Amino acid sequence: MEEKLSSVAKTFTPSPIQELSHLAQRCNAINLAEGFPDFSAPPCIKQAAVSAINNDFNQYRHVQGICDQLALKMNKMHGLNIDPLTDIAICCGQTEAFAAAVFSIIDKGDEVLLFDPCYETYQGCIAMAGGIPVYVPLDPPHWTLDPEKLMSSFTSRTKAVVLNSPHNPTGKVFSREELEVIAECCRRWDCVAITDEVYEYITFDEQKHETIASLPGMQERTIITSSLSKTFSITGWRIGWAIAPASAASAIRNIHVKITDSAPAPFQEAALTALSSPTKYFETLRIEYQSKRDFCMKLLNSVGFRIQFKPQGSFFLFAELPKDCLLSDVEYVKELIKQAGVVVVPGHGFFHGKSGSDQPSDESFRHQKRYIRVAFCKSEATLCAAAQKFGELMNAKGSPKLHC
Amino acid sequence: MQAAECTWSQFEMLRPLCFKSPSLFSNFSKHSPFFRSNSRINRYPSFMATMSSVSTRNDPLSTPQITHQPLQVAKRLEKFKTTIFTQMSMLAIKHGAINLGQGFPNFDGPDFVKEAAIQAIKDGKNQYARGYGVPDFNNAIAARFKKDTGLVIDPEKEVTVTSGCTEAIAATMLGLINPGDEVILFAPFYDSYEATLSMAGAKIKCITLRPPDFAVPIDELNSAISKNTRAILINTPHNPTGKMFTREELNTIASLCIENDVLVFTDEVYDKLAFEMDHISLASLPGMYERTVTMNSLGKTFSLTGWKIGWAIAPPHLTWGVRQAHSFLTFATSTPMQWAATVALCAPDSYFEELKRDYMEKKAILVQGLKDVGFKVFPSSGTYFVVVDHTPFGLENDIAFCEYLIKEVGVVAIPTSVFYLNPEDGKNLVRFTFCKDEETLRSAVERMKEKLKKK
């Protein structure tokens, strides 16, 4: 049977992340790693799901009302005209929407640009469809987009650019100028933009999320993917969508039907309640996450970090290890688990390949092992407990005890 | 907050994934999905001026013709149109027809399972589940499998939870089939098999099951299967015919697979709707577990088709491929429903016995009714489907018959030609379902008796 394994299967190696996870579990660590909330979903949305189950919304269905509401939202937020009958595909989470989007347009050998650091799943999807991921590094410490790096990554094989904004893991929100650069490249090279906008409602300090689809010439070449998960703290319900020009949306819908057939019925019903939440809900979401962000920054600064990039959105903080800390990210995370009982994610897993220079040296991608990602989508109690643990890291003189 | 099982679901995404062999992954057609002009657009002179110092890798700017093509999708996808089920359902609504087409019940699932889901939601089990399944659910699946087949499996290494059996099929195809691999299918087949095999770039070899008993044509199978065959797909009990693969047929298939080192993917979603004989899992035959992916789901057994809870059971080396594809397709499966499914799978024997009894009564009503109306009804041993020959009514083919049936009689059936590679093979057959309450079944039969006349 061994020879039945694919060549890829044979290259599989155990992950250092797995080892860290076992260590964290053994130490019963406070979890600031996982990207989902440990607080409850909004009661009225849960109630809507409960009602749906009780009212027998339990067979295969497609809830057109979701599309109607999304079309309204996209018009209100971004000024886009979306046809709810033809331009939207409801999927099992943004994950499936993205997978279906990739399958709908990526052929074997097509190149897809990704901004580095980035969420791991995109690459897997692209490879599964026969595409080739090409990484465009964002420049630390502020994760700015260098137009030169972007432009030089395009080839005649480039089919699409993946844009995740607000961004996991850095918390960056791509600026209008940056969106315009990306848009211009897409127009110029006749490429598609596939977006992941799951954190669209989590932005801070007057920052507003803009979708690249609202830029000139972009709606006809953009596939937007998003979901309920992060906005409504229901990551386990699997309700997401793709919004695209009708021909692409139709293809995505048809692929989705072959992959899963439909998204969970009772949660589609509950989505109607979620999507009609009053403006106040979204404002409160922002304010609460912003205060959690500020709390986390203070917390890290108190143990020797100097955060150079304040998250503009998402619920992640991507922090560079203190200069005098000689540990790698993985080593630091291990120490943090052992000494403080708190777990975060080592950043190097989000980086791919060499950082953009033609002569890559150890120096130029040394930074890839110098970041940790902290998730602050946690209850006050969790964050305070984490703060206390971090506090114990400081010795009597007020300097960090954590051996670096 | 859920316990440890959800802790690392995000982490799992950070595993280093080595995609060294592009051949593992799906290969679409060779057509360019885009109309791409070779000329470059020079519509934004100021930007271009700024960027003029940047050298681009391959493509010089050429003549500034403005070609402005909207986003176009691959020509290969034109095959995957709106499904026949949706089309028929839409037509049914328009004409107020009784829907015996689409395979989902018009009655709901059992209260004890629904209550378990509600409790899970209230208990806060609403965040990402572990990618390959909530541990308790994986355990329940393993326990159920042991009860049904006698096989002892490791729930941690050999069970993957998916969004319905549909996703289990997609993940199995995309995770285990390389482009160019030969896969054998039995027609008629559930429509997602062909679609996902096509996404995986497989070469499909089709063996047609024919009325009246839809027996496996052993000679054809013998000549179709070879050392070049990568996998064979079996659906038993079978949609749309209701056929159940017999022990003899499964033994034959098993020995051919062992001899030629072929994988088997089985879709057993109707295993609890086995009426005329016992359901046999191919994985339980000697030498078969190590090469089989056994797929199933909650939906049909518990009348909760919209919850999308399914699973794949396979030895670790095959489970790995399924889990990889699954992690990129949907990442995780609906959490509260998994908790409810755990409760469901532990239902007492009496639940399953009553389920069978109920369905057998419904089947009797429909089958007798269809015979009385004048259809030639083929024997169906399992599932909640029955196929019939419609030709006594003088319509040209199955699609024409179904349209007539909706518009003039007010009943929906599914034309079976869509389940064949060659639609001609199905033109005499249509599929009815009896997963409806008895009153609906009787009304449908009455309408047909009244308005459907033999020619």
Image: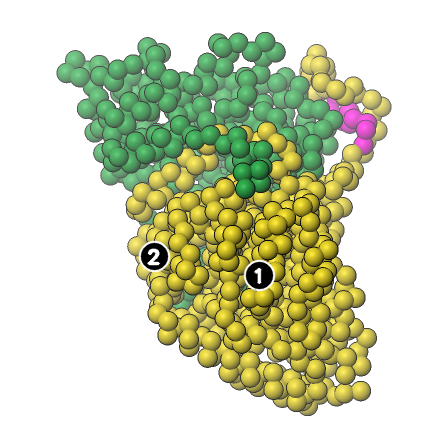
Chain colours: A green, B yellow
Q: Amino acid at mark 2?
A: Ala
Which label's residue is closer to the chain start, 1 or 2?
2
> Which residue is at 78% across, 26% downward?
B40
- Describe the element under mark 2 as helix, strand or loop: helix
Give the letter of the chain under mark 1.
B
Whether residue A15 is visible, yes or no, is yes
For this rendering, which residue is in front, A251 or B146?
A: B146
* Residue of label 2: B120
Give the letter of the chain under mark 2.
B
Residue B251 — which label? 1
> Which residue is at 73% across, 81% downward?
B408
Left or right? Give the position of A142 relative to B36.
Answer: left
Q: Quadrant of the C terminus of chain A?
A: top left
- Describe the element under mark 1 as helix, strand or loop: helix
The verdict on residue A11 being magenta is no
For this rendering, which residue is in front, B37 or A209?
A: B37
SS majority, magenta:
loop
